[in-house]
Amino acid sequence: MKLQALMDFFEQVAPLHLQESYDNAGLITGHKDMEITGVITCLDSTESVVEEAIANDCNVIVAHHPIIFSGLKNLTGSNYIQKTIELAIKNDIAIVAMHTNLDNVFQNGVNQRIAQRLLLENQEILKLKDPENPDVGSGMIGNLASPMDSMSFLKYLKEKMAVNCVKYTKLHKDTIQRVAVAGGSGGFLLNDAMARGADVFITADYKYHEYFDANNRIIIADIGHYESEQFTIDLLSELINDNFVKFAARSTKVVTNPVNYI
Ligand SMILES: [Zn+2]
């Protein structure tokens, strides 16, 4: 099967026109007439992931984050982006990114997977892109089946999202039931989370001063960027394996998270 057919499928799942203006989702290396031998899914298409693809006879990498975000002026191996692109091209590996287009869809999107892990009910897009379409927009909001003690919820969050560390603001409420989520850098959605009555807003990449914006109105819980999106890796491989039989998709075994905790 040619890569074009996989790209056509992705266009149905998360059309490229739904990506944000700053983004670079889509086909980054490779040609659409390539015959697919196998697929590796990942968050970050690093050099290690390209090496993993080569070792497993997979010539397509489907990543969440685009390895090329802004323009490349040369390919001289001077940074990890250039090295990764060179290795991919030398080995005829296609790299595809499903980034903010996958963030912005309800069905099979990054945030639906988070909401499912937290067993949120009545899931809705947090901030609609166009009010006329309830299935497209940023973040997700939903309710726990019953209220949970706030600290118990944070422990539940750690367990369900498999994180070692949760950074959170003051627990100004005793219980939590309404939960807003946004995988990755979702801080821009805080006002929407508050406006829609969320007790807690789960996202990543919060800076020190931004935590003050919680202001006893909501609990901000920062679970880490990689951690918030890690289940997107399986989401992508499952989507592919559920829809294609001529080749297999596997989730990367490389942990690409550049952040460690002690
Ligand atoms: Zn991300």
Image (cartoon, rainbow, N blue to C red):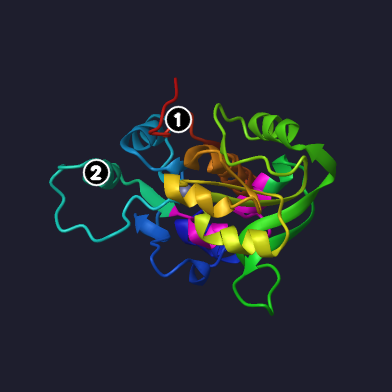
Quick one: which residue is furthest to the bottom in this view?
Answer: 132
Q: Is residue 262 found inside the magenta-colored segment of the image?
A: no
Q: Residues within 10 Å of mark 2 (few under 14, many from 20)?
A: few
> Quadrant of the image for the C terminus?
top left
Find residue 221 and report its image quarter.
top right
Instruction: Look at discs 1 and 2 and give the one toward the viewer.
Output: 1
Q: Nearer the viewer, residue 63 or 36?
A: 63
Q: Residue at x 67, y 78 (%)?
A: 131
Under mark 1, the amino acid is Val
Give the magenta-colored segment's residue range. 97-114
* Relative image position of residue 113 (x, y in whole percent): 66, 47
State whether label 1 is within 8 Å of ligand 1.
no
> Which residue was labeled with disc 2?
90
Query: Residue 17 appears at what percent x and percent y?
Result: 49, 72
Q: CA distance from mark 1 to mark 2?
A: 23 Å
Where residue 152 appears, as percent x and y from the top left, is: 74, 31
Report which residue position mark 1 lands on.
255
| Farthest right residue in view | 146
